[in-house]
Image (cartoon, grey):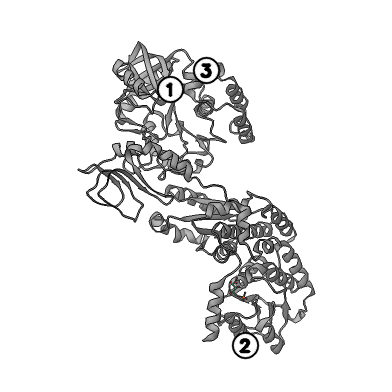
Amino acid sequence: MSVYGVIMAGGKGERLWPASTPARPKPFLPLGGEGKSLIQATYDRVLPLTGRERLYVVTNATLAPRVKATLGLADSQILVEPQGRNTAPAIGLAALAVSLADPEGVMIVLPADHLIEDEESFRRALEAAVEAAQEGHLVTLGIEPSCPATGYGYIQRGKLFGSSHGHDIFKVKRFTEKPDEDTARRFLSEGGYYWNSGIFVWRAARILEEIDRFLPKLSQALKGLAGLWGRPGWEAALRKSWQEVEAISIDYGVMERAEDVVVVPASFGWHDLGDWQAVWEVLPKDGTGVAARGEHLGVDTARALIWARPGKTVATLGVSDVAIVDTQEALLVADMKRSQKVRELAQQARPAPPKWEKLLELDTSGMLEVVASFPDQCRKGLELGEEADVPPELSGFSRVLCVGMGGSGITGDLLGRLLSVPVISCRGYRVPSYIGEETLLVGVSYSGNTEETLSAFEEGLSRTRRALAISSGGKLRELCASRKIPWIGIPGGYQPRAALGYLLFTLLSVLRRLGAAHLELEEALEVLAGQAKALGPASPGNRAQAIAQALVGGVPLIYGTSGNTGPVAFRWKTQINENAKQPAFWAELPELCHNEIVGWELAERVLPEGRVVFLRTGHDHPRVQARIEILKEVLLRRGLSYLEVEGEGKSEAAQLFSLLYLGDWVSVYLALLNGVDPTPVRPIQELKDRLARL
Ligand code: PA5
């Protein structure tokens, strides 16, 4: 008969707000001693009784990757509830997993967010409980109360039932929900009452029988799921069942009604850490009662809990009985004795859903409309390229040199993914010295007036006569006319970055005619058309809006992959800069595994707002995909969050362009969430004007 551990890791992140949040609830706070998170400490504590293979964690989809990264468990050991249904369904699910692994298995159920001082005596109490559970009893651990606490349920003991491992074991007479203070005082003076620890031990088969007796709907759902464990269809079936099962606690649903429930009284320094005062009580303090995590400077400060951000000092003067918690989310200053009420603040602090209708008014120049027309631009671009006057003598080149800046310059990077010959992107005043007649020189400037592009194009013309240019007009057009170089005109009136469909697809079509394009575009165009509908403002709550909401207030670090999504990551960065008017950075795998990841070490201090976005397609090298999986875990262990964004469609081009287009939408929604008009890019124009005057 083997012993299994089941750690219950959930929580709303309210009681220890703002250090805890829904995405980083209490189990993940470093309160477990020696800098460990509470869940890690829970895991380490029970490990000697169960072994690594016999541990399960029940959690939700948001926390599952963090649990995996923290504890390094296999996917099969992480039981993901589609929605929280209180403890009875969660325990039922774990009991199902244990009983399928070992029909005789005994399971220890442990909340992931308790602090326990004396681990040896904790394990001894559990050994006693396991022995009783093996005999078929439902066992709960009762904590000897040290004060008339009103925040816990109480267990009244009945007759002495036996003893094991130095612990008396009693029949349970009654469970009482959280009492008022008078009742709690009476319990303490009468004696024979224990705090309900939420730690249970029983045979998995036994608790399933009790669930069958008292919670037949849940039992039915679990029986239906049994045949699907580890098979396709599990997730869908679980999702459906969990919509129907009743949300109920195991105490109320089973323990209070079952017979043969026993309690093992224990006192091993148990703390539920239910509010900041409770945390203050357990943390080491200086002579004035100040418990500080991080840097604290205090004068005339007493009985205070200080929770500072890495790299930022909290200074206090003449305060006492106060909890000060500084995090990226908020700065809390609370009367310590009233810290139970922090929960109310946490609830109020939850961001309200954006009022998109109102925010859309910020888009005074109609950027959303232009973005929506991108698929049309691409198709029209292909037509323009077909009609363009391109002399056949231009063909026969062995590489393409694209000169262009900013919103035009990205064209060269993207062409590099789409052509059958190498493409060099040149952003600057000069072209590389090795360029000669074998190179097709392509000048790309939407306005036709960008000085770096004009300079490099002219220099390029001194090396090769195989050249063409694209713009909406400007000096580039004049230069081409005077030098008799083919020039392709595209419609004017757009921001350069918003004319990418014209710039890129016109050139692609021309280069296809010259024999240099190799990727099939039809599926990509269909996918783009679908996205134009799905991601527009007429589809509120869409994927692009959700991503923008996840990024707002942060510094996006967009990660693409070399030879695939790298240019798209760069486009996300530049679009976020220009549309959303905020910093963003990009890097490429696998290269970033050789430098950037070291920079994450101090990210919590210097870039706590960093938000990693992995751009993913099915076309990355398998080792690159494996690297991303590892990086996700590294990020979570460092407390950094990430998003994964998948391309749509099957073909390389569809996945690439769908990611690019998604990024365009995200950048515009992010602009609106930032409260800015996406269209104007004044700093660019101002710089160009100043340079023109020099
Ligand atoms: O998006 C923008 O407005 C800029 O990045 C421009 O593209 C950049 O300044 C170069 O201008 P142009 O595209 O007109 O050559």
- Work out whether mark 1 precedes mark 3 in sequence or the reverse, and give the earlier one: 1
Residue identifier under label 3: 210
Picture quadrant of ligand 1: bottom right
Residue type for callout 2 = Ser
Secondary structure state at the residue bearing disc 2? loop
Q: Residues within 10 Å of mark 3 (few under 14, many from 20)?
A: some
Q: Is residue 274 above or below residue 373?
A: above
Residue 560 location, x and y as percent?
56, 59
Residue type for callout 1 = Glu
Q: Is mark 1 within 8 Å of ligand 1?
A: no
Which residue is nearer to you in this view: 261 or 314? 314
- Work out whether mark 3 precedes mark 2 in sequence or the reverse, and give the earlier one: 3
Residue identifier under label 1: 177
Q: Nearer the viewer, mark 1 or mark 3?
A: 1
Which residue is nearer to you in this view: 526 or 494? 494
State the image quarter where residue 523 is shown.
bottom right
- Identified at 30% across, 39% down, the residue is 280
Secondary structure state at the residue bearing disc 3? helix
Q: Nearer the viewer, mark 2 or mark 1?
A: 1
Residue identifier under label 2: 462
Residue 81 location, x and y as percent?
55, 34
Residue type for callout 3 = Glu
Q: Nearer the viewer, mark 3 or mark 2?
A: 3
* Tag of residue 598: none
In space, the residues marked 3 and 2 are separated at their CA atoms by 87 Å
Q: Residues within 10 Å of mark 1 (few under 14, many from 20)?
A: some
Secondary structure state at the residue bearing disc 1? loop
> Can residue 395 be seen here?
no
Which residue is nearer to you in this view: 228 or 671? 671
